[in-house]
Amino acid sequence: MTDFARLYQFTQQLLVYSDVLADPTGQAFVRLLQGLALPHPNPTQLSRDYANLFYRLAEEAELYQGEMVGNGWQNHLLDRLLDSDGLIATKAHRTPHKPAASPGQLVIETEYPLGMGLISAGGHDLTRLQALYQLNATDLALKVRQLTDNPDLPAWSAFKGLGQSAEKSRERRRYELKKALVDAKDWAFMLDELFRFYGENDPSEFNRYQGFRWRSEAGTLAGGRFEPVKYVDEQRFENLIGYEKERNILIGNTEQFVAGLPANHVLLYGARGTGKSSSVKALLPRFAEQGLRLVEVMKHELADFPIIVEHLRNRPEKFILFVDDLSFEAEESSYKDLKALLEGSLEARPRNLLIYATSNRRHLVKEQFSDNAALGNEEVNAWDTVEEKLSLSDRFGLIITFITPNQQQYLAIVNGLAEQAGLKVEPEELRRRALRWELSHSGRSGRTARQFIDQLTGELGLKQHD
């Protein structure tokens, strides 16, 4: 008989591999075990917890690309173990390696890369993770059936993935290690093999994704997390029409940055729809292979900058913290958090991190007549307050201005986009309609031109289908 209380205790005893169960599926698994471990489980809550976990495992398993090992939960746990970004994986990634005699393998240069304390903790955790792996899905489903009066409740042991074989050497290595773990009598003795695998393959999501969003999580040990953006809004400079001079400045600064040379924080200032955000996004396809990563940070999360810096400081990649549509109302004080990071904090800024921000305001902080009026009231340092607000934008080493295009520039953008879309329209007709569109919409801008071309492309496409 499965001892669910004992297994739940195992989930709470992990010392250095707690990240393996930290994802939503792992947490759903923990909640289910916790419910089963109670002296008097709540049938309704138990049904919800099982349904939540079952759906997550079914979705992952049925859409799995590659060869699965074990049932839905077992394959998930093995993948999480191999993708760990905990202390052992981080140590392996930072330990010097040299090529081995066998192609595709690495040899650790350090004779004893792990301290005995870490080796003991790793073995301790792996023994418990192995017990969680060996949980019998049928026994668990049977227990839940009895407690919830749900006699036809299925187990999570009969899923079928997409069935693509692990052909690439890296995927084959991963598959073989998963099989080796299944066959191992004691996972504690697999620590050396896992350490070698971590050294060969950076387990961090920064190695697998290019774009991220920072999610603040106040009260947690990490303070927040980097959420991968799986489907990045991909922009390419060759598809962006106009503003070549401005974009070349941005590209040049970023090129210096990824090359490890001094570079500046950048403020892209200008009217709406002029392509400021698209220009920043277009840096990813250009420089991602050189290690560039883009992290989007919301304005209300500016106070998390010290936490973000601490997470990224020792990473090998180059990070741009991207703050879109940045501006502050006169009464806001959160601009001080940004100002401290740009310049003036005691802590040195990491050389692998820059801030790129876009804004419609040149000085970022909205000025009011009350700021000047304060010069005559009891505030002794009123002028210092005004100067502090106005100096924020000066902390950016580069300020690139995207001005509203004139009519000629607007039409040039329209013509370029029409050519990219392969539209067959008489030039005079295209010009006439583009100007009419601009008058009835948000004025002249690259965004307006793009919206016009999208509309025209759709109209012409429908006519071809008639």
Image (cartoon, grey):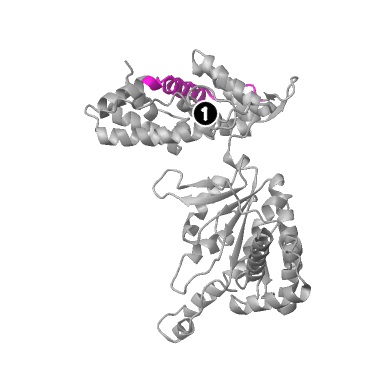
Examine the image and state in which quarter residue 316 appears.
top right
Position of 77 compared to 260: left or right? left
Question: Can you give x and y, in whole percent of width and height, for residue 357 in the image?
Answer: 60, 63
Residue 252 appears in view: no
Q: Quadrant of the C terminus?
A: bottom right
- Label 1 packing within 10 angstroms: few (<14), some (14-19), many (20+): many
Question: Can you give x and y, in whole percent of width and height, for residue 41 in the image?
Answer: 24, 30
Per the rendered image, the range of residues in magenta is: 110-138
The kind of residue on which mark 1 rests is Leu
Question: Can you give x and y, in whole percent of width and height, for residue 290 in the image?
Answer: 71, 46
**Furthest-front residue in this view:** 466
Dot 1: element: helix
Position of 395 compared to 102: left or right? left
Q: Which residue is mark 1?
A: 81
Magenta region's main secondary structure?
helix
**Furthest-left residue in this view:** 40
Residue 306 appears in view: yes
Magenta stretch: includes residue 69: no
